[in-house]
Image: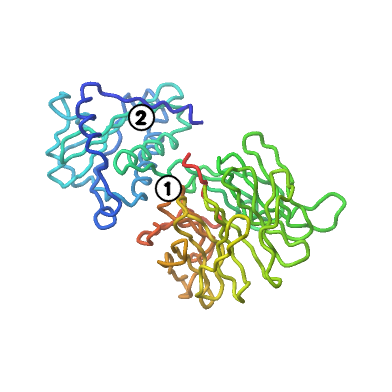
Amino acid sequence: MKSVIMTLAVVLSLAPAVSQAQENGIYIKLGEARTKKSLMAFPALQYFGSPSSSSKYQSVGAELFNVINNDLTVSSYFQFINPSAFLEDPSKTGLMPAPGQANGFKFQSWSAIGADFLIRAGFSIAGNDVTLETYTYHVGKAQLIFGKKYKGPTSSARRIAHTFANDVLKQLTGTEGMFLSRVVVSSDRTDGKTKEIFAMDWDGENVSQLTAHRSISISPAWSPDGKKVAYTSYVKKVGSKFRNADMLLLDLTTGKRSLISYRPGINSGAAFDSDGQSIYLTISQGTNPDISKIDLSGKVIGKITNGPAGAMNVEPAVCPGGNVLAFSSDRAGKPMIYTSNKDGSNPQRRTFAGVFNSSPSWSPDCKKIAFAGQSEDHFDIFVMNADGTGMIRLTSAKKANGRWSSNEDPSFSPDGRFVMYTSNRTGKNQIYISTVDGTEERPITRDNNNYFKPKWSTNIE
């Protein structure tokens, strides 16, 4: 899919401005963005063609614009200027400034309304291909930061838009965005009764169904390269009257599905090791649940936890690229968050408050852990440093009846700036995201289905 998008540097006549802008380095610093968002002007896209040349130019243009606008809005770096404040009519001026372009725009028209950055873009359609031409400017310095063209099938318009939004963040902040990432989740959206595994873009669009067991399929997890998904399903075996919580592995490239852990009892809570060659999971086998490690064929490599004293140890989470594991355990009485080395040695209790703490999730740099914590009769999402210090609450929302909602199953974005989770505040379990500092929250799904245990892909694209 990546090959369908062609990215080209453009406008040789502005090359000196590009070089000068790049020498200035990062335009937006994270700490400053938290206190003051940059003002962004993003006029409607121009269409380079006659309306009669393509019947779908309006829908393609709207999709490109809306995806870019949503991505950059969610990034939390920008505040968009209302088009009613524009001093120029962008439909009557070119994408490049005057006097270089005869009908070019004037930087002073944008600086006068306080714009820090300006994006001018247009698109054309030839057959089944769309080309998006973009220019991103620093208004105060009257400089082009970068100009690029993106080309691909019209069916890839969303991906083209996500790619451009990623490039904007990379150029302005030095850090790439997460707009090409995917989410895997369990949902009842097929019939409202059974649960199947689905994949979708981070923004809830482009949904694809991965399983059709007509049963209960839960707790999906991505492999580090995003090419495999492990999950648990209550699949009825041939010749058996019972359904067992078995773990399966789906290769998204080949479509091959393998049964990798089907020991009697629970086989759930998959977490791929950083190399993608093994999986941590919870196995019960008629006893209290403990965490084990298996290879991709299902062979047990080792038992990671063993109690103590019959304690429950569940929901393993692997620190990306590190030697640390996080999990939930009731070894001290109430389920709390613990960390240990990957082999189970050096266990350390990290949470001490609340009634029930569960579903730990590591940030990509392994410096923070998100988890769901119960107080009274509901759960909320918390983020803390890996050693348990610096804890903050991300969620606090009520239902329409005035009761507190439950917010559960956190998962970090691949860039570490957001946490995704489910919330039943609308009456249905919907997917939400919050900035990691809890300052901004927004829904991702807005439908009448229920979603459970979403997992953000660990790869950016």
Q: Which mark is residue 132?
A: 2
The residue located at (44%, 64%) in the rendering is 384
Q: Residue furthest bottom?
A: 376
Label 2 sits on what residue type?
A: Leu
In the figure, is residue 440 to the left or right of 224?
left
Q: Is residue 121 left or right of residue 457?
A: left
**Element at badge 1?**
loop
Q: Position of residue 423 (x, y in %)?
A: 50, 63
Residue at the image position 23 percent from the left and 29 percent from the top: 19
Instruction: Tell which of 183 and 328 is nearer to you.
Output: 328
Residues 48 and 310: in front is 310
Q: Counting other residues with Cα less than 10 Å from the Cα at mark 2, is it few (<14), some (14-19), or many (20 or more)?
A: many
Q: Which residue is mark 1?
A: 415
Q: Toward which corner of the image does residue 240 lie, by quadrant?
A: bottom right
Q: Nearer the viewer, residue 185 or 375?
A: 375
Confirm or deny contact between disc 1 and disc 2 (CB under 8 A).
no
